[in-house]
Image (cartoon, rainbow, N blue to C red):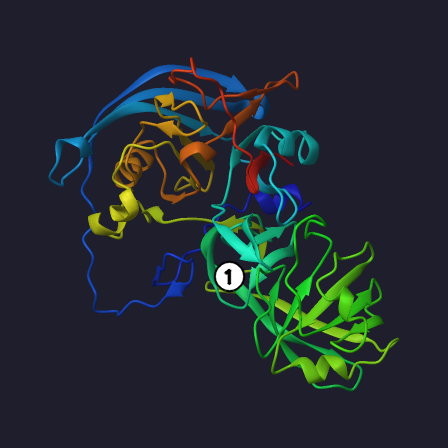
């Protein structure tokens, strides 16, 4: 854990220019392009009640109304909003299921960060197909936990979290570097626990990949132990039946794609592997804890900075439950939960706010930077009492006659104090 003194340096890591595509890839924007922020207006923000939780955290419950500048009365919305204000020394830590698995946020925080003071759901998890099995759920973006890369690609993808100094940061991060075995040729590292083995490089698989979930097969695979020594080389003619096998405890699998497979096939047992794998961020900082995220909702105090159109795609103007995370100008963290109004009977949730309307609320409650996490049926928030009891809070204002379903998630953020 980073020392307390470091957490008090509350400088904010600024973002580089650019936007992020739907798949999470950083997309450079022409410098001459001017975007007018979406001018949503919070017409009412009424405090229903407030409640303290562990670590001097504060949960405030509001009823809010927002006027959208676009046409269509359905864009003007009214709903409940929950705002968690965390103490100045609180910071987010990643809680996660193994790649390919899902767990409830309540279960993850109790098992992984029981001394945290609150927890929210995290990244999106669209379905992917691996080796013929469809509907495998993996985080859409990166996972960096306690400085360790759990999941990332060479392609830079957007994230939110903290750097190694404890500063809030958001931008994009990927991998750079290479892997060489013995005196063999160095090959570019293409990913860690990624859903594909990309051609021309090597993808690393660790025990962070769930055993029960099919793992992508390399054309050639080299298994190394904790000391980075080669213990097995798998090819189409040698140990071929173990290509794509689960990663055994104490080992990692280097999966070579076509175009690099001859390099992997030339590895010798007992040779030493040199893994030169580093983070590559748009801001140049090293990430300590981070997960993938959606669109920026507030940046440098500007709400909906990408313009109305960017927040209306894919039905994002519709009233939906939302999870937002960000920080104030002083660098203290806050999260926003839009719980919605009712369950539909099968676990989905209705009602809430459109994305740009949520951005206006985020600015109104004091966020200088705010980012979208997964929402809809994934919207979940827990707080811990000073006596250690965890309570689910995202049901406020919901009609729960049809149930209190909690969807399993791939990861989340738990807020902890040193």
* 2 to 155, vertically: above or below: above
Residue 325 horizontal/vertical position (percent): 44, 39
Residue 285 horizontal/vertical position (percent): 53, 61
Q: Residue at x 47, y 49 (%)?
A: 126
* 211 to 104, vertically: above or below: below
Badge 1 element: strand
Res 358 quadrant in image: top left
Residue 72 horizontal/vertical position (percent): 12, 36
Q: Nearer the viewer, residue 243 or 281?
A: 243
Res 391 quadrant in image: top right
Q: Nearer the viewer, residue 230 or 295?
A: 230
Mark 1 highlights which residue?
Answer: 173
* 218 to 353, vertically: above or below: below
Horizontally, residue 186 falls left or right of residue 61, namely right
Horizontally, residue 279 falls left or right of residue 325, namely right
* Farthest-out residue, right: 270
């Amino acid at each position: 854990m980073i020392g307390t003194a470091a957490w008090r340096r509350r400088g904010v890591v600024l973002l580089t220019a650019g936007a992020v595509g739907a798949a999470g890839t950083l997309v450079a924007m022409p410098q001459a392009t001017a975007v007018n922020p979406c001018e949503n207006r919070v017409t009412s923000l009424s405090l229903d009640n407030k409640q303290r939780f562990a670590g001097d955290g504060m949960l405030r419950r509001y009823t809010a109304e927002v006027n959208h500048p676009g046409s269509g009365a359905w864009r003007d919305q009214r709903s409940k909003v929950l705002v968690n204000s965390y103490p100045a020394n609180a910071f987010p830590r990643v809680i996660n299921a193994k790649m390919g698995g899902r767990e409830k946020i309540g279960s993850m925080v109790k098992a992984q960060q029981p001394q945290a003071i609150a927890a929210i759901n995290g990244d999106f998890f669209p379905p992917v197909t691996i080796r013929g099995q469809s509907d495998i759920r993996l985080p859409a973006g990166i996972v960096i936990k306690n400085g360790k890369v759990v999941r990332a690609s060479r392609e830079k993808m957007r994230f939110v979290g903290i750097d190694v100094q404890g500063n809030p940061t958001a931008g994009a991060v990927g991998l750079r570097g290479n892997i060489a075995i013995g005196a063999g040729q160095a090959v570019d590292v293409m990913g860690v626990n990624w859903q594909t083995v990309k051609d021309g490089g090597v993808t690393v698989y660790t025990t962070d990949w769930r055993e029960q979930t099919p793992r992508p097969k390399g054309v050639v695979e080299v298994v190394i132990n904790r000391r980075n020594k080669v213990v097995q080389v798998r090819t189409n003619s040698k140990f071929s039946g173990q290509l794509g096998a689960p990663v055994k405890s104490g080992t990692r699998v280097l999966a070579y794609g076509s175009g690099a497979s001859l390099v992997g096939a030339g590895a010798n047992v007992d040779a030493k592997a040199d893994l030169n794998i580093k983070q590559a961020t748009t801001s140049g900082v090293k990430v300590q804890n981070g997960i993938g995220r959606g669109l920026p909702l507030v940046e440098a105090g500007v709400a909906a900075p990408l313009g109305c159109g960017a927040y209306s795609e894919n039905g994002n103007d519709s009233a939906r439950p939302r999870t937002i995370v960000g920080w104030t100008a002083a660098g203290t963290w806050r999260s926003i939960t839009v719980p919605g109004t009712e369950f539909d009977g099968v676990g989905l949730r209705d009602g809430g706010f459109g994305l740009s309307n949520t951005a206006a609320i985020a600015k109104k409650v004091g966020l200088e930077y705010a980012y979208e996490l997964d929402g809809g049926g994934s919207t979940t928030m827990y707080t811990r009492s000073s006596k250690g009891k965890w309570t689910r809070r995202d049901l406020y204002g919901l009609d729960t006659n049809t149930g209190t379903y909690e969807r399993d998630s791939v990861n989340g953020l738990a807020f902890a104090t040193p």
